[in-house]
Image (tube, coloured by chain):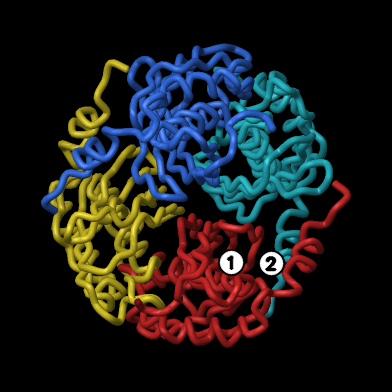
Chain colours: A yellow, B red, C cyan, D blue
Amino acid sequence: MGSDPHLRTERRLSAPPDPQFAERIRASFARQKAMTLIGASLATVAPGVVEIALPYRDDLTQQKGYVHGGIVGMIADSAAGYAAYSLMPADCTLVTAEYKINLLASATAALVARGEVMKAGRTLTVARAEVYACDGTHIASMQQTLMMLPGRTDHPE
Amino acid sequence: MGSDPHLRTERRLSAPPDPQFAERIRASFARQKAMTLIGASLATVAPGVVEIALPYRDDLTQQKGYVHGGIVGMIADSAAGYAAYSLMPADCTLVTAEYKINLLASATAALVARGEVMKAGRTLTVARAEVYACDGTHIASMQQTLMMLPGRTDHPE
Amino acid sequence: MGSDPHLRTERRLSAPPDPQFAERIRASFARQKAMTLIGASLATVAPGVVEIALPYRDDLTQQKGYVHGGIVGMIADSAAGYAAYSLMPADCTLVTAEYKINLLASATAALVARGEVMKAGRTLTVARAEVYACDGTHIASMQQTLMMLPGRTDHPE
Amino acid sequence: MGSDPHLRTERRLSAPPDPQFAERIRASFARQKAMTLIGASLATVAPGVVEIALPYRDDLTQQKGYVHGGIVGMIADSAAGYAAYSLMPADCTLVTAEYKINLLASATAALVARGEVMKAGRTLTVARAEVYACDGTHIASMQQTLMMLPGRTDHPE
């Protein structure tokens, strides 16, 4: 195929249009009260890559004591969304158009969701998130489509 | 096409193999501590159809004050999952293999997620969930695949 | 929930912005040489609803003699895409951003894919397609996101 | 996170249960008449990784002259499916339960779909496929769920 997509991704991601992207993401994340509710925190913020950490807590579980699949989806959604946001200009917001997640293993420990941009288009960005448990178990894989809304605030209106 | 799929669905769903399915689902839902955390409650439990209600709460929101898309995914996941579970025998549990959700509108009000079985297979069940706001706005549509695990408890092991 | 989404859909779909939408779709479909290759034809063209018919042919099958899942995806993709296109203005084209399809049963007969618009937004449209065999068997369910490109031709450039 | 998922994948994939997996896949692919119809061929068969090549042909296109998104889905579906099949025992068949594909760029050239296993479970396998054009353009990304049917033939019955 003559071309390493990972290399191409690195190159594409090297110069985010907003040099203050990390501060912008940290401030936006701090406004996500749902992340506070579940105890999630930002672990990594880099151009095109964002990681979110989640402790294991009894009140995040489903009926068998595993972390609820929807909670896994929440941190994957935010991780991939902020990865996309890191490559966008300062004066925009973005919305998740859709995501698809495969749950690969039961989650019974602290988790990290790593979001990564696959294709940053003018209007749509496609991103992925992988969720791992702290012992390295691959918990979930998500593929997501986000839409940039230029000239719109990322704060409540 | 000579055949109304809705009619066929009604017929298929009329006799769940476990007559105690509603009690079983209510008990399982009560063990989902993540549902308690976000304030979700079971609104409807019928063969092949389950509805979950969620109040609007400030601590469920994302950075712009809308209900977090991952929270919308949580109630859709549980609603469709319990719809599937309603048609399964008593001595099994089920896991969500994957789901895909389109977020259609911002959620700024109380929500109801309605889960419905599309195809109940021997191993896999395909279900859908629609999420509506209390004013009738269509918030999200989910399509989901669940796997039945026969002879396995639905309780913590 | 106080509101029947099907009714609301009917109302929304009653006045497509381009009164010549049916001719526009038939001409666009005629340019889809891939549809000719597999023998697919337009069966229904209505506002927000398009059906595509596919005969059973030996050269459309996978290793066990069933219609290839990717072929099922092809007619579902085009049916839902043209359903979306029926509600768009005359001077635009559209692209499929993504789709997700569940294959519910093996296809061993002629098929019809029925595409239907769920939410027609300014930029993104969300549509679904159901694929049925001629004996009424539910073969597949698809959920799809399309992006309108205003002011762009639907012909080769 | 202390663990490279790619390394772990390599290790997991190193010993397919059927040493004759490549012959088995080549024979199965040869029975997929839909692949013959579109001119697709097997380019790589390795444990957990299968590549399918597709020439650009006018009769594979949609209305604007790009390769039809459903055709892109077909080769992605088969590539990921055979990647999954390479890790399965000799006396089984498999079915695609579902797939989700994001179309990232218009396809106007020969394509290669590279399928790769992410998680090979007892019943379900999760795989991905990336589709690239011969100039390196990333055309599509697919995430797929397959179900193994043990003791069932992969031939017409």
Given the image, on which type of amino acid does mark 2 rest? Pro
Disc number placed over residue C5 in the picture, else none: 2
Q: Is residue A41 left or right of residue C75?
A: left
Please provide percent x and percent y for residue A93. 33, 56
Residue at 74% over, 74% down: B15
Mark toward the viewer: 1 or 2: 1
A71 shown above or below B27? above
A127 shown above or below B129? above
Q: Secondary structure at mark 2?
A: helix
Quarter of the image for the C terminus of chain C: give it: top right
What is the crowding at mark 2: few (fewer than 14 residues within 10 Å), some, or many (at least 20)? some
Instruction: Report whether residue D102 is seen.
Output: yes
Subunit that carries the residue with mark 1 = B
Q: Which residue in the protein does label 1 denote? A: B130
Q: Secondary structure at mark 1?
A: strand
Same chain letter for marks 1 and 2 = no
